Amino acid sequence: MAVVTISREIYSEGSYIGEKVADDLGYHFVSKNGIEKIFLEHGLVEFGKVYESIEGFWTRFDDMRTTTIEFLKQVILALTSHGNVVIVGRGAFAVLGGFADVLNVRVQAPLPIRVRRAMEKEKITESHEAEVFLKQRDRERDAFVESFYNIRWVDAAPNAFDLVINTGKVHPDMATAWVVEALRDLKKRKEDAELTTKTIKVDPELAGTVSEVLGCHDTH
């Protein structure tokens, strides 16, 4: 069993790479929508709405914030325990950074390239508007990660990832091949005394929800 997390800048093609990796390996692809379904099954507020619509949410200190962060952590661990998953975003790399059988990947691209992609996908006609849009989304994601780590993102990032890919120079399909090959190599390595995902303990009810949402009751 091995797991891939993909952290990405918006319009760096990280989600595309994650889906392709999952397809190539026959893994489950888990993004915001899948995690939201798990939240809803447990009667919690839809994570995407909390993350994207409440201004300043990640800088507040209240019960709602604490509950959301803690449950998200448990969801990520439950997905990892299920096995054979590619998890895109949601700070998964921060939760799983200590596990020897998890490959943490960062996908990024220069701002001008992301601006062009945003203009095309978002139907934005002015480049400066696309740049403002991207920088706002980047700030939202950084605020989330910094809250999850309890340290500044720029301090955590240099040592947080096993593979960093710039899709301004590396085609997303080539990046997919790199990730697949890196994961296959990782699975061949002896675990020895290293911390692995086999040590994760998951609440049975949450594990059941994960299996239902993934549509898979196999043990990987």
Image: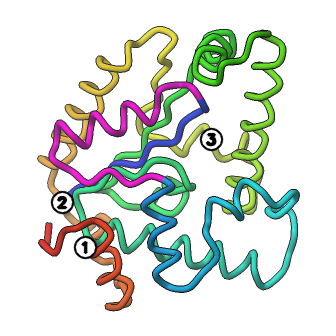
Residue ID for mark 3 = 157
Q: Is residue 147 above or below residue 159?
A: below
Can you tell which mark lies on residue 198?
Answer: 1
Residue 125: x and y in percent read: 75, 10
Instruction: Give the alpha-carbon distance from disc 1 to disc 2, as whole Å.
Output: 9 Å
| Residue toward you, 210 or 199 | 210
> How many residues crowd mark 1 within 10 Å: few (<14), some (14–19), many (20+)?
some
Sequence-first disc among 3 and 1: 3
Left or right: where does residue 130 sit relative to residue 215?
Answer: right
Evaluate if marks 2 and 3 touch, with contact meaning CB atoms under 8 Å apart. no
Residue at (45, 60) in percent of width and height = 96
Left or right: where does residue 83 sit relative to residue 162?
Answer: left
SS state under label 1: helix
Q: Amino acid at mark 1?
A: Lys
Quadrant in the picture for the N terminus:
bottom left
Quadrant in which residue 72 is drawn? bottom right
Q: Amino acid at mark 3?
A: Ala
| Residue toward you, 132 or 169 | 132
Magenta part of the protein: which range? Answer: 11-31
SS state under label 3: helix
Can you tell which mark lies on residue 1?
Answer: 2
